[in-house]
Amino acid sequence: MVRGIGGRAAALLAAGALLATAGCAESQRDDAGDEATGDGGGGGTFVFAASSDPVVLDPAFASDGETFRVARQMFEGLVGTEPGTPDPAPLLAESWETSDDGLTYTFDLRDDVTFHDGTTFDAEAVCANFDRWHGWTGLQQNENISYYYNSIFQGFAESEDPELVGGLYDSCEAQDEQTAVVTLTRPFAGFIASLSLPAFSMQSPTAMEEYDADNLEGTADDVRFSAYGTEHPTGTGPFQFGSWERGQSVTLEPYPDYWGDAAQVDEVIIQTIADGNARRQALEGGQIDGYDLVAPGDVAALEDAGFQIEERAPFNVLYLGMNQAVPELADPRVRQAIAYAIDKDAVISQSMPEGTTAATQFMPDIVTGYSDDVETYDYDQDRARELLAEAGQSDLTIDFVYPTGVSRPYMPSPEDTFVAIRSQLEAVGITVNPVALPWSPDYLDRIQGTEDHGLHLLGWTGDYNDPDNFVGVFFGTPKNEWGFDNPELFTALSDARGLATADEQGPAYEAINQQIMEFLPGVPLASPVPSLAFAEDVQGYETSPVQDEVWNGVTVS
């Protein structure tokens, strides 16, 4: 998932920080009480605390986890994921076939599905969604607004920017009511897996037209979304939209004509509580039923108090980035010295949850292309000192920029991680100049938008199970974050992305991972285990490594 979000999202985050308190959570919980009504299964009201407001309720224009958390309850795509894994699985498409040349995908659709406004889900609706994305113009094409379509499909039917014309998508044909045929302009082995992203959910063509879904106003940094995206989101999922109180909560209700397993609760409230301590206190006080991103230091205490702790299988990577625009870091011997100086196991024990594993490369081991034969730079302080001396940098001083006021699945406690790494670097003679910045917007703007940084902490939680979603995101093009130009690596990643099958991708990405770790743009540190906490009476919550967590099976006694 995207690590940073732009101006509109930042504004909503700020609003959430001001408005969302444990007191707000208490009032929501008390108001819901035993009076919830609807067509659920009598499972009560489920109140879940999110760290921020959604940005918009139209997932096609979203790229952040909290928006997707809400969207997954209301929307579904052609493809979902196998429970408990990041692997693609049938959802609104019961099956699909791929042509031998990797260009044509034929989807057989479910025939018992309706959108929340009663519109029939069929092949025409599928093509309406694909054609909508490809037909976006102007502000809709901005990467800050349509990030995932830009990232995956890389082009539109028309654009004022010649580089944005065309792309991966060619056409969609409704062969009959239950058969949609999507044709690409070039092979992309990750196409099916990418369709599990909430950004590619199927939405009601009727509702999108009625409420002018693509009518965006403002600028990319301050966009005003349509009535559809703020008041009338319409999908096929087990829950339908109820209300949205900005900066406070989103309320969802069971959809009575849902094609799958009916929701067991009578109501869902996603409550915005920006502060992690306030989320924990709201759970302890009984105002909420669960929350995400539990601080590692809170896990044992919550368990001892009788709360349930659920862990997601890690599908992420945290790394120490090294900006080669800094002359000292352009020397590979200095980068190698830094890698040898780091004791990953000690960093993990000091700042990450139990069960976290050390990383050897920039993707988890379950992703196609993971290599068992990369350079690992095992902890060796003497070797680090030798390399610094060879590079003439025995008295190196370097800026180390790290974020404050944030917790991410791949980075649960950045301040503690910084402290651990700083002490290890100083132990081999590197003087660290600490630069602490608020996560949004200061930190991300510094790392991703300028060359004014040396070392930094960042990471990624995978969106779907494809290697391009990890190493392609990090190293596919020149970026301010890394400060290098490596045409050989860029070309290898571009070529691998265009392979038609995972069988072809595997060896190509294994070679790329070996190439990356020899080049060493940064040090992969760990794949932390994200934790969620729930009240004792919550049952049926199924975790997913890609957060594909739909709550129709949840009950609250």
Image: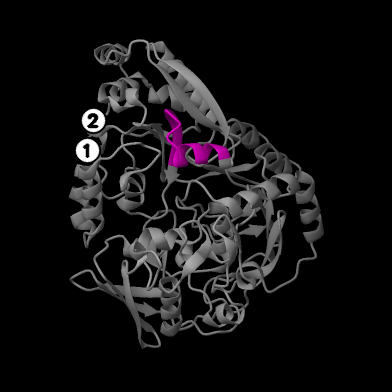
Which region of the structure is painted magenta?
442-459
Q: Is residue 454 magenta?
A: yes
Element type where label 1 sits in the image = helix
Q: In terms of image quadrants, where is residue 91?
A: bottom left
* Mark number, residue 538: none
> What residue is disc 1 on?
514
Element type where label 2 sits in the image = loop
Amino acid type at mark 2: Glu
Q: Can residue 372 be seen in this view?
A: no
Amino acid type at mark 1: Gln
Q: Does the magenta stretch include residue 106?
A: no
> What residue is disc 2 on?
375
Residue drawn 64% across the image and 36% down it: 302
Mark 2 vs mark 1, CA separation in Å: 7 Å
Residue 239 position, x and y percent, is 61, 69
Would you place residue 280 above or below residue 335 in this image? below
Seen from this angle, which residue lies furthest bottom?
176
Are the residues tagged 2 and 1 within 8 Å (C-beta)? yes
Residue drawn 65% across the image and 72% down it: 227
Residue 114 position, x and y percent, is 53, 81
Would you place residue 390 above or below residue 209 in this image? above
